[in-house]
Amino acid sequence: MANSETKFLLQEKDMPTAWYNIQADLPQPLPPVLHPGTKQPIGPADLAPLFPMELIKQEVSTERYIDIPEEVQAIYKLWRPSPLYRATRLEKLLDTPAKIFYKYEGVSPAGSHKPNTSVPQAYYNKQEGVKRLTTETGAGQWGTALAMACNFFGLECLVYMVKISYEQKPYRRSLMQVYGAQVLASPTDTTHFGRQVLAEHPDSPGSLGIAISEAVEDAAQRGDTKYALGSVLNHVLMHQTIIGQEAKKQMEMAGEYPDIVIACTGGGSNFAGLTFPFIKDKIEGKDVRVIAVEPAACPSLTKGVYAYDFGDTGQLTPLVKMHTLGHDFVPEGIHAGGLRYHGMAPLVSHLYELGMMEARAYPQNPVFEAAVTFTRTQGLLPAPEPSHAIKAAMDEAIRCRESGEAKTILFNLCGHGHFDLSAYDRYLSGNLQDFELPQAEVDSALSRLPAMA
Ligand SMILES: Cc1ncc(COP(=O)(O)O)c(C=O)c1O
């Protein structure tokens, strides 16, 4: 029975107690991760300098469900289960027969979905005796989430924050410092790779690929330190599946099942978190469309190639098969800093290749226009990243108006935009620039992909 309520809330006792691992259900297994020198599949020992063994095991596991440790569940309960809303006011404004639902992850203390993985990552590192974690951050949401988690587990935290975001969002830095983290603007002069970038490009705005290289280099040099990544890796995507599992229960409470599930994609984690439990149904025969939305300035799914590439600019990581714009591609300084990554999660790339999902790209002005419309109807101020999903959800709802179809649309509102007001200022004053990535630039970066036999 359809339910006309505005929000659908689960009790703490209804919170999922296991993460969903889509590797158990893939129609074809993921291509292996390769050693950049030998081009042979790597083993757990190759990753051990950077990650704790429990996370390495999760990375390669094909068990369908992996239990969430009780200490992690207890911290999740500070904000989980997160609410699911029906956007009735937006539906009315768009005059659409479609029903629009959104899962809201901005209720976490850090303001986004990122603590769903920072908390277990800090937990497993602590369990294995690690004292210090390094990481990168683009939008600042991931750095904030890791800073909070490290603080909860008594770990030191060093965040390499992409320089353009450091300048655009000074208060993200402050929040990380309140949690006790140290924050540096990347590229820095404290790592070998950072100095190399600065020597060639003194005014580099930075990128996630560069910041990852700095954080990896730092961690690899110290016995007490490991590295934490906020997206892309299989275990990170799996930790986020608590979002989609909750959303499924909440859609049931609403008496609905989505026809279309939408999320933005930077490295792919909030997208995976919402959609993988629905893609499980799709693999089992259910009819559901899944759409990933990326920025036109960094369109790894829609313009990149599916190839082996490095996860970072400095070529310190193993080679993963993914959609990529080339590891040395530095995207324009768009305000969706969390979407400025040259690659896409191997799991998301693989599902895209298998035809299990669609992808589209938008420039930033229409995205901000959608975000402002959303704020003026629903009241919540979204981060620029999920505003890409809002734009796609609105476009789908408008299509329903034109076709007269009453589809059910679900999207992930994976973070609030309270630290993004300078971007909104620029949009409102007409000073936001759109960047359409020239094909020649893509071709040039792709020509430097690692040679494969
Ligand atoms: C609010 C928000 N949404 C989305 C993203 C993109 O990352 P992912 O694709 O891993 O969800 C980020 C990354 O920093 C973010 O902060």
Image: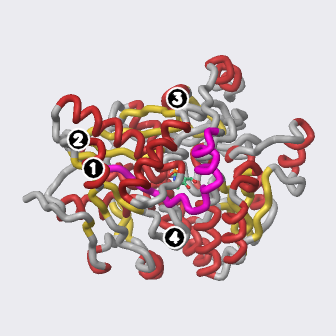
- Tell me the residue that label 1 is attached to: 100
Mark 2: which amino acid? Thr
Task: Say which residue label 4 marks.
Answer: 120
Which residue is rendered at x = 31% and y = 45% of the image? 261
Amino acid type of the residue tagged 3 in the rendering: Tyr
Relative horizontal placement of residue 340, taking residue 37 as reference (left or right): left
Is 68 one of the magenta-colored residues? no
CB contact under 8 Å: marks 4 and 2: no
Q: Which residue is mark 3?
A: 306
Three-letter amino acid code at the position of disc 1:
Ile
Contact, mark 2 vs mark 1 (Cβ under 8 Å) = yes
Of the numbered discs 1 and 4, the one sitting upstream in the chain is 1
Q: Nearer the viewer, residue 54 or 430?
A: 430
Tell whether position 422 is magenta.
Answer: yes
What residue lies at 71% left-to-right and 70% top-to-bottom? Answer: 174
Quadrant housing the C terminus: top right
**Distance of label 3 from label 4 (alpha carbons):** 30 Å
| Mark 1 Cα-neighbour bin, 10 Å: few <14, some 14–19, many ≥20 | many
Q: Which residue position is annotated with label 2?
A: 96
Q: Position of residue 102 (x, y in %)?
A: 33, 55
Magenta residues, start to end? 410-430
Q: Quadrant of residue 16?
A: bottom left
Q: Are marks 3 and 2 in contact (CB under 8 Å)?
A: no
